Amino acid sequence: MSPRLASISDLKALRQSLKKTRDGEKPCITICAGTGCLATGASEVVERFRQEIRDRHLEEKVEVRASGCHGFCERGPWVVIRPERVCYTHVGTTDVSPILSETLLEGKVIDRLLYQDPTTGERRVHEQDIPFYRGQQRIVFGGNGEIDPTRIEDYIAIGGYQGLEKALSEMTSEGVIETIRRSGLRGRGGGGFPTGAKWEACRKAEGKERFVICNADEGDPGAFMDRSLLEGNPHRVIEGMLIGAYAIGSEEGYVYVRNEYPLAVSNLGRAIEQAGEYGLLGTNILGSGLTFALKISRGGGAFVCGESTALIASLEGRVGEPRAKYVHTVEHGLWGQPSILNNVETWANVPVIITRGADGYASIGTSGSKGTKIFSLVGKINNTGLVEVPMGTSLRRIVYDIGGGIPGGKRFKAIQTGGPSGGCIPEGLLDLPVDFDRLQETGSMMGSGGMIVMDEDNCMVDTARYFVQFLQEESCGKCTPCREGLQQMGRILDRICEGKGEDGDIELLQDLSRVMIDASLCGLGLTAPNPVLSTLRYFRDEYEAHIREKRCPARFCKGLIALSIDPEACRGCGACLRVCPVDAISGEMKRPFQLDGDRCIRCRACEEACTFDAIKIR
Amino acid sequence: MRADLQAVCEIIERHGHRKAALIGILQDIQAKMNCLPQKALAQVSRSLDIPLTRIYEVATFYKAFSLEPRGRHILQVCLGTACHVRGGARMLDYLENRLEVKSGKTTKDLAFSLERVNCLGACALGPVMVVDKRYFGKINTRKIDSILEEYQDG
């Protein structure tokens, strides 16, 4: 039987019947199968569950679901047993048998697998009681844990394609745009441009055809919400794009995905195929007359392709060089035709807005930034993972209540937001409510939502250097301010980190920044000085210590530290000697070893290997 | 080489002979041949009627492409921000010293190509290293040693 849905009532009927088969009371073992958990062995765990359930003839009684990313990657492989939502962390294949025997059949909770709070040591049984989840509002990301992303039926059963259904049956194209506009949705990719205004401009622009494009070239290092959405709930993105296509009158769309995300490419590819089989992509969708085809285009690994005009050049098969912005993509986009380009998270918000209505959506967030935002909370933080919170949530709440604070009793130093275009926010601003405008005021920006927490061991000059180096490699080289400016800034920062900084370097960095901001062609160059300017604004003392005292306060910069072995602490175990790649360590076993400072390349492998804390850094 | 060129033509065919599909075509060629050999690029140029210079422009612009043969195993060290703050650069240094090869290059015995990548989106596991698409999280110098040992002969 062809599953093709000929009308909206067909879709409704299918959803009803799927809902019936999804018995809410039937035990379901959900194993997170996102990239993070797969890296720690989730696929073997899924396989073992399936095997054991077959062996024990439990197929009728228990369901096993390899789901989308749950966002708490730190604790993977992550297993949730429904309906109670008992939650187990770091599950390995040897835990499968006890989980089935004890938890599933006898209803007993296995203590050692439970989540343990890193600060209080308390254990939590249910997913919803874990502070990491309790502080979140997951209106966009929540579906991930409920579905197997390779099954369109799962998505439809939890209310998927209801937004499309509503748009096609109850709303005009203008009505859809008006709803998006009134919802206050702003682009989640970084710029924060109002989505409704973009769509309206595109609809009004003259052109032979129109294109709908999804930017999944998530290049900001430290941000992975788009990967998780595309991997874990691809149909939500497809649904958003379908609604966009209906709104502007487009028949063709593209998803431009990073090549570094193989699972996202395969799950999305599968989702597009299934949507086609069900008649949700193709001609005369649900009998409405809407025609829409969706294609995947894989990126080639160039950060600049996150910039709209560079992305379009890449889609056309050319090198990803941006063009001047006075030509608008909404009017002259792909093949010179009107196009709307939104990022993954923006598209994933669209079905939510249509089903909830503009007012329902706009009730969440702050006056200038509506809805929720997904952040990837990473770096020196206890609970690394994806966090979806209403706009306006304070940084402190995100870092301490949800993120569980800094590991190892270290001191918080800064939080970096906005990727290479953003900046570092110091401790004094932790109570800042996070939205587009407030972040901008601090000299940082929302960007795509990466939040990298840094502690006392991280050097802020090195952080600025890291981003400048990153951008230097990623600059396409088309315009001079960005190409040359970054190179010169990189040289100055290298010099400072090596202890060769001079008076006047800080002023030179500021001068270069001003020129780049004034004269660069695209967003990459315009925002490239932000990491330098924001660290200068809040951590100028660290720059001065490097330049004047030739000292790195965080003891991080290789050129400004020296390693030695503390003879009091050293037990002569030889662990350091074995790992030293340049044979700088010598000595007799069971006696204090010596470290040859001239040979040492300060890789700190010995520090990591030493269990007696005998390697000292000056 | 003849058989290889046949494969190139098939890839171009699969992409519907479209000039716009150039990047996808090059990706598939690289997946098949491990790099982009000059003869393959010349074939693409002839088949799609795109000047060879433009093909080289694309092949050298995007980081995903390599014009030189790559090793039997591809080691990718993530230097995204999350991995950086957790010492990813130190891991890359260590690998460069251990393998006596700079990042972006291949060892003389063609066993390993060492690459740095900007964020694999597995930040919770940082520092991360990927060997032939298999992820290794929270790496340190000891883990690297045992990983290299595992792959050295295979």
Image (cartoon, rainbow, N blue to C red):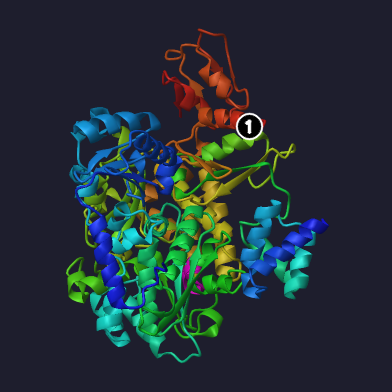
Which SS class for mark 1? Answer: helix
| Image location (x, y in percent) of residue A89 | 31, 37
In which quarter of the view is residue A598 placed?
top right
Answer whether residue A522 is magenta in the image.
yes
Q: Nearer the viewer, residue A408 or A364?
A: A364
Q: Residue at x 19, y 48 (%)?
A: A25
In the image, farthest residue toward the right = B2
The main secondary structure of the magenta stretch is helix
Q: Work out whether residue A545 can be spotted.
A: no
Which chain's residue wears label 1? B
> Mark 1 = which residue?
B98
Q: Is residue A563 above or below residue B64?
A: above
Q: Quadrant of the N terminus of chain B?
A: bottom right
Q: Is residue A291 above or below residue A1?
A: below
Crowd around label 1: few <14 · some 14–19 · many ≥20 (10 Å): some
Number of dots carrying numbers: 1
Q: Nearer the viewer, residue A400 or A525?
A: A400
Q: Nearer the viewer, residue A615 or A148?
A: A148
Which amino acid is tagged 1? Arg
A308 with respect to A171 (left or right): right
A548 with respect to A191 (left or right): right
Q: Residue at x 47, y 75 (%)?
A: A293
Q: Work out whether residue B151 can be spotted.
A: yes
In the image, farthest residue toward the front = A1
| Image location (x, y in percent) of residue A397 | 21, 50
- Magenta residues (range): A516-526
A486 with respect to A275 (left or right): right
Q: Nearer the viewer, residue A467 or A474?
A: A474
